[in-house]
Amino acid sequence: MTLEDVFATIVGHTREVVPGLDDHAFQFTDSLRELGANSIDRSEVVMLALESLSLKAPMIEFAKAENMGELATLLHARL
């Protein structure tokens, strides 16, 4: 699985969790917070991505991600 595949997984879950992003053109530099995701939404996106990628990891490891690209990189490194 490529980094772009992991990013696409995050994008899909972000669209599920955060309303109004159906037509948004996601970039690696997008911040979930700036896209309107509150802390619960962000946690849900990470949990759903972990589940989709069949990964088990402490949520705290992903708190340092500043944007969706960094989150994808952190998840991809665990594959």
Image (cartoon, rainbow, N blue to C red):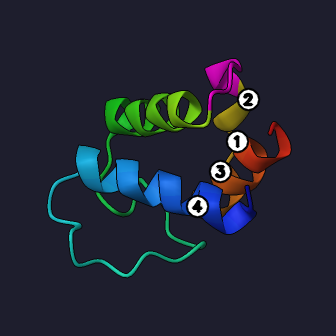
Residue 66 in view in this figure: no
> Whole-percent x and y of residue 46?
51, 36
Q: How far apart are marks 1 and 3 (CA)?
A: 8 Å
Query: What residue is pinned by disc 4?
Result: 7
Instruction: Answer with mark 2 or mark 3, whichever residue precedes in sequence.
Output: 2
What residue sits right under mark 3 in the picture?
A: 71
x 33%, y 37%: residue = 41
Give the Cα separation between the discs numbered 1 and 2.
7 Å
Which residue is denoted by mark 1 in the rendering? Answer: 64
What amino acid does circle 4 point to?
Phe
Residue type at numbered disc 2: Glu
Q: What stretch is highlighted in magenta?
A: 54-60
Labels 1 & 2 near each other (Cβ < 8 A) = yes
Q: Earlier in the sequence, mark 1 or mark 4?
A: 4
Q: How far apart are marks 4 and 2 (CA)?
A: 17 Å
Q: Residues within 10 Å of mark 2 (few under 14, many from 20)?
A: few
Quarter location, residue 29: bottom right
